[in-house]
Each structure stands twice: as C-alpha cells, then as structure tokens.
Amino acid sequence: MNLPVVDVSGIVKSYQMETHQVPVLRAVDLRLESGTFFAVMGASGSGKSTLLNIIGCLDRPDSGSYRLDGIDVLRSSDNELSRLRSRYLGFVFQTFNLISTLTVKENVELPFLYRTEHRDDISQRVDAAIAQVGLSERANHRPFELSGGEMQRVAIARALATDPKLILADEPTGNLDSQMSREIMELFKRLHAQGRTIILVTHDPQIAAYADACATMHDGRFIHDAL
Ligand code: ADP
Ligand code: MG
C-alpha cells in the first residue's frame, strides 16, 4: 500500500471558553492516499474548518497524531510548519483572500515570496497556473475587475502554482452563485483527473458529489468511517 499523504489519528481539539472547555474535534481519524478527491460534509459548527486548519498546519490539536507525507507534523516547530505549508499545501478559501492592490499575476506569485527559485522559473510556473484556470487574458487585471468565479479561479491558480502535494479548499463555492459554483467544481474535477490530491469542505451535498469520496462530520466526529 502507498504511504498516505494525510494520516490523521485520534485528533482531539477543544476551545477554552470563559468558564469551560468546548470540545470541537473528538478523536478524528482520516487517511488519504495520493490522488484522492475527498469531501468533508457536515452542518455549520460540526468542526470541518477546525479539522481542515489542523490538516493545513494552521492550527494544532490538543492530542492525536498527524503525518503529512510521512512527516510528523505535531512534533514540528512553528518554523518547520511554515515550511511545510509553503512546500506541501495550497489553500483555497470561501472569501478568495486575494490582495486587492495586486494584479492576478502578482497574487499568484505570492506563495513564491520566500522561495529561492529563479525568477524566470517562477514566472513560467505562475503563467502556467493562470493558464490552467483559464485566466491568461486577465493576468494584469486586479481583483475588483473580476467576477466572483474568476476571483476564486485566481485563488486556485495561487494554490496550484507551487505544485503542492495537497490542496485544501474550505467552502470554495460558499460565496458563488450556482453557475459559478459548477464552473469551480468542474475545475477541481479536472485537477483531480490530473492526479491532484484535494480535500474539500462543504455543507452542500451537490458540491460534495464532485469528489470521489466523502464523509460527514457531526459534533466533532465523522459519522461514518472515512475511507
Ligand atoms: P464548521 O467549519 O463545521 O462550521 P468550525 O470548525 O468552524 O465548524 O467550528 C466548530 C466549533 O468550534 C463551533 O462551535 C465554533 O463556534 C467553535 N470554534 C471554532 N473556532 C473557535 C475559536 N477560535 N474559539 C472558540 N471556538 C471556536
Ligand atoms: Mg467552516
């Protein structure tokens, strides 16, 4: 069997409120092989984003274990986590998170800011990522000149450009109408067909149906065994 890209086991997380601890994740397990397109479903507040942020090395659990491509994430320092994020992961958020004063091309270049590749290589990879999401004609536009669907495609290009091992998307269609949502999901489907590993968080079963595997969270746990 291949080494899983994501190997999460017994992850527990709670938040300290004024007087008590609120459990958010209660012993979550998840193993994903390279090339999987996996959807995490569940109602608002069920813990989806918390889990995705832990998988994305943006947050740490209270206990459990997590290996990302064999690396023991929970024993890594904050510096190592930043490095893991920039080398291994691409993020797509509901609110696009583009920088409004930068052009499309400059936004897609952002993940390379602290990397040492040659400028020409970076420029080529950025152009290729923008072409892949069908926005070459818009490379010098700024976000306010784009539709919501186009802005999300820029965010996907930015997530792709560094050739990450794993793409994490948290409600990527949450701010889009149904036509634009379909376009974005068709794009994710194409990326999956090219061999990309994707974790998609959504509360919408129609969106989750684009993935090839899916599990539902309820109250900080997967209801069914996830793979
Ligand atoms: P989902 O993405 O499924 O809507 P979240 O993972 O965002 O759920 O949140 C799960 C629960 O954890 C919610 O009850 C939420 O209020 C709580 N929560 C999330 N982040 C924090 C935080 N930083 N501080 C306190 N509670 C939080
Ligand atoms: Mg959420």
Image (cartoon, rainbow, N blue to C red):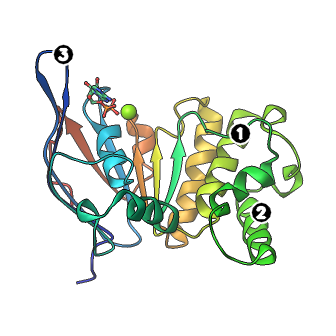
Query: For mark 2, what is the residue?
Result: 131
Residue at label 1? 99
Q: Residue furthest bottom?
A: 1
Q: Secondary structure at mark 3?
A: loop
Marks 2, 3: nearer the viewer? 3
Question: In front: mark 3 or mark 1?
Answer: 3
Quarter holding the C terminus is bottom left
Q: Element under label 1?
A: loop
Q: How far apart are labels 2 and 3 at the CA level? A: 49 Å
Residue at 28%, 82% (x, y): give it. Answer: 2
Circles 3 and 1: CB atoms closer than 8 Å:
no
Please tell me which residue is depicted at 75% across the width and 35% down the height of the picture.
100
Q: Residue at x 32, y 26 (%)?
A: 44
* Residue located beneath label 3 in the image: 18
| Of pointers 2 and 3, the one earlier in the residue sequence | 3
Q: Residues within 10 Å of mark 2 (few under 14, many from 20)?
A: some
User: In this rendering, is residue 191 above or below 209?
Assistant: below
Quadrant for ligand 2 reads top left
Identify the mark nearer the N-term, 3 or 1. 3
Mark 3 crowdedness (10 Å alpha carbons): few <14, some 14-19, many ≥20 = few
* Position of residue 98 in the picture relative to residue 195 (left or right): right
User: Residue at position x 19%, y 20% from top?
Assistant: 17
Please tell me whether mark 2 sits on a helix, a strand or a loop: helix
Which quadrant of the rendered structure holds the N terminus?
Answer: bottom left
Instruction: Say which amino acid is labelled 1.
Output: Ile
Asked whether, in this view, residue 78 is left or right of residue 82, the answer is left
Residue 132 seen in this snapshot: yes
Q: How many marks?
A: 3
